[in-house]
Image: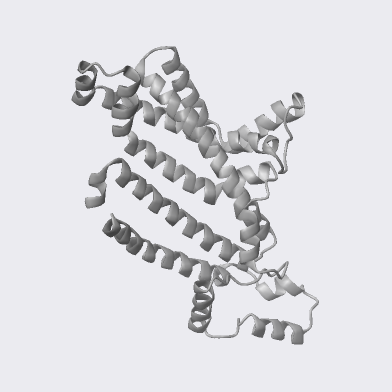
Amino acid sequence: MAAFIFRRLLLAIPTLFGVLVVAFLLLYVAPGDPVMSMVGERADEETIARLRKELRLDDPLHVRFGHYVGNVVTGDFGESYITRRPIIQDIKERFPKTLQLAGAAMLLAATLGVSLGILSAQRPGGIVDRFGLGLAYLGISFPVYWVGLLLILLFAVTLHWLPPSGSGGLRYLILPAIALGMRSIAFLARMTRSAMLDALGSDFVRTARAKGLPERQVVVRHALRNAAIPIITVLGLDFGAYLTGSILTETIFSWPGIGRYVVNAISRRDLPAIQGAVLFLSTVFVLVNLLTDLAYAKADPRVSYK
């Protein structure tokens, strides 16, 4: 297992280095002068020259890249052009909110999606199976922003049951978690159903039933465990996407997470904030993939030998 983890970490290094290069070049590929975005068009030449020197924009490209890599390695993502605050401090304040939203959406999706998939596989063609199929079609077809607006219109504007936006207690988390997790519920339901049908038709399941084991034990301990690999795949990929790409959901519900932070940075041309957020989120995605690989190895020990 240790060798398996080491191999996965080695594979992550080129990916993170590529992201580091892209994030660095983002500042120089984007149109416009970052200094002019900070000071405006009426600033004098002396102020502009001083800021360019402070930001090391006059240094050669390779020198700037070396300085940037050195800062990132020590955990320094620079300062925001707009707020003049350390970007890592902004990320520390915002990311827990994104993690809270992603965790709630993933918990909802895993509970409902896997349960619905198992029930559908136990009785193919039944009422639950047809309901799950219809839910899957709806969840995949509707975009997240449309689902979010529909939830706000129904539960906040019409019924007044839940707040339409903002953050606070559990009531503020329900609508964005449902909107974000809807597609995963649909994918997990269909993926679980397909994997469970294959597992329930296997010889080891028939053998377990022939031994007189309770049906619940056959389904959970034998069939579900052998069907876990594709389910883990969906869970890992979706959770990584939630942590790094819930921009639409956070914007619709005014959720103060890192996705909304990136949107605000883009609208204000705060390029260092965009750089830091992109690099941080890419690192998070790589770590989530590593945890998914470890879950593979736990579910099927043969994976660690590949």
- Residue 186 is situated, as x and y percent measured from the top left of the image, at 47, 30
In the image, residue 235 sits, relative to residue 153, either above or below, namely below
Compare residues 3 and 15 and report the one nearer the observer: 3
- Residue 22 is situated, as x and y percent measured from the top left of the image, at 48, 66
Q: Residue at x 46, y 70 (%)?
A: 21
The reply, left or right, for residue 182 in relation to residue 292 is right
- Residue 141 is situated, as x and y percent measured from the top left of the image, at 51, 30
Q: Residue at x 65, y 51 (%)?
A: 260
The answer to whether residue 306 is seen in the rendering is no
The answer to whether residue 72 is seen in the rendering is yes
The reply, left or right, for residue 76 in relation to residue 125 is right
The reply, left or right, for residue 252 in relation to residue 195 is right
Q: Quadrant of residue 187?
A: top left
Q: State how many labels appear.
A: 0
Q: Residue at x 50, y 78 (%)?
A: 70
- Residue 127 is situated, as x and y percent measured from the top left of the image, at 44, 12
Q: Which of the colour schemes (rainbow, by chain, secondary structure, one colour) is used?
A: one colour
In the image, residue 270 sits, relative to residue 128, either above or below, namely below
Q: Quadrant of residue 16?
A: bottom left
Q: Residue at x 79, y 83 (%)?
A: 44
Residue at the far right in the pictured view: 42
Quadrant of the image for the N terminus? bottom left
